[in-house]
Image: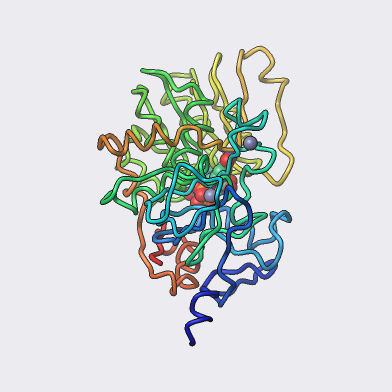
Amino acid sequence: MNAVTKMTTMKALVYHGPGKKAFEDHAKPEIADSADAIVKVTKTTICGTDLHILKGDLPSCAPGRILGHEAVGIIESVGPAVTAFKPGDHVLISCVSACGKCEFCRKGMFSHCTTGGWILGNTIDGTQAEFVRIPHADTSLYPIPDGADEEALVMLSDILPTGFECGVLNGKVQPGATVAIVGAGPIGLAALLTAQFYSPGEIIMIDLDDNRLEVARKFGATQTINSSDGQAVPTLMKLTHGRGADTAIEAVGIPATFELCEQIVGAGGIIANIGVHGLPVALHLERLWDRNIAITTRLVDTVSTPMLLKVLRAGRIDPKLLITHRFKLSAILEAYETFANAAKTKALKVILEA
Ligand SMILES: NC(=O)c1ccc[n+]([C@@H]2O[C@H](COP(=O)([O-])OP(=O)(O)OC[C@H]3O[C@@H](n4cnc5c(N)ncnc54)[C@H](O)[C@@H]3O)[C@@H](O)[C@H]2O)c1
Ligand SMILES: [Zn+2]
Ligand SMILES: [Zn+2]
């Protein structure tokens, strides 16, 4: 490889349509807008949403796209309008890009930014590469101190803010309250970790996978229910003395688990949906109309990232618990295999080192 090729190409994981991906040479990104930064990726990971894309569930992501929306890295170059960062700075990349100026950003709804939102690894090239272009760099990157634990920080790109904002904040978790979390994947476990900021009395974790339920116990779940016997509702009702959950967090994204939340939410409770749903779900108002409940939905905004960074720095949370496997970026196809076969490999989050 001559010097010129070395500078203009890089390796990246490229989506080539449903079921197809390749780790291949790709043009290195360049500054396209004055507010952009080019970041050299040091650590990245794979999300369940990347698997959704590979199944063809997200038509917004076109073939030819570099996947990935979670990473930490070092700034390589910045556009002339970037004032908060300079080359050499260590940064956390948020899964949501935000201009900070539009109507939605001014409301803290970064996920609906008119020129941003969840675009990385979706409608623009993402982080599973040696370099990534970050638009609206000033308001989409977070400075990280030198020597900070990069692996732990990768969990703050998406997983932790998602579990916290969509599950815990929207679900108004209260001290002493009963929280039920359906789905013990990385997102449900992130909700479990961050729900404990508020000292709920009970956190009941529901899943089909005994290994994940065992992990949930280690992360602080007070009770676990394996729902594969179809008895989750009576079991939870017994555990809560017939009252149900004050907060029922849906962290799977299928009709069965949302409908389970409708059955286990107690009077005055909240169903906080996190799951990405591709199918219609039955809303049983004939049972719920007089229960004084609320239902919330949310696309993660990552407004809680600065707070989560402080909690991490203070050692009040250990998101590294979610990391089960580590690979070099060049072994990303193997990492995808491992991540996609979680029931067999017991994978939660995998770290890819670029
Ligand atoms: N709202 C947002 O902004 C946002 C952001 C990121 C991810 N998500 C979504 O959150 C959801 C969870 O993400 P994840 O990465 O943890 O997914 P995951 O697939 O790793 O975990 C889902 C868990 O649900 C369990 N499960 C499946 N069917 C079940 C059933 N019938 N009953 C009980 N448990 C069941 C699985 O065993 C698994 O442990 C996904 O739908 C994802 O797309 C939403
Ligand atoms: Zn994600
Ligand atoms: Zn905006």
Left or right position of 73 against 101: left
Q: Is residue 339 above or below residue 197?
A: below
Q: Residue furthest front?
A: 80
Q: Residue furthest bottom?
A: 1
Q: Is residue 232 above or below residue 252?
A: above
| Count of marks overlaid on the render | 0
Quadrant including the C terminus: bottom left
For the residue pair 255 and 171, the one nearer the viewer reads as: 171
Residue 341 spot, x, y in % from top left = 49, 64
Using the rendered image of the protein, determine whether residue 158 is visible from the camera's viewpoint.
no
For the residue pair 345 and 266, the one nearer the viewer reads as: 345
Residue 201 spot, x, y in % from top left = 35, 22
Q: Residue at x 43, y 56 (%)?
A: 75
Q: Is residue 264 above or below residue 47?
A: above
For the residue pair 163 and 25, the one nearer the viewer reads as: 25
Q: Residue at x 37, y 26 (%)?
A: 202
Q: How is the image coloured?
A: rainbow
Using the rendered image of the protein, determine whether residue 187 is visible from the camera's viewpoint.
yes
Q: Is residue 141 above or below residue 351?
A: above
Q: Residue at x 47, y 83 (%)?
A: 3
Residue 36 spot, x, y in % from top left = 56, 51
Q: Residue at x 61, y 20 (%)?
A: 294
Displayed quadrant of residue 52: bottom right
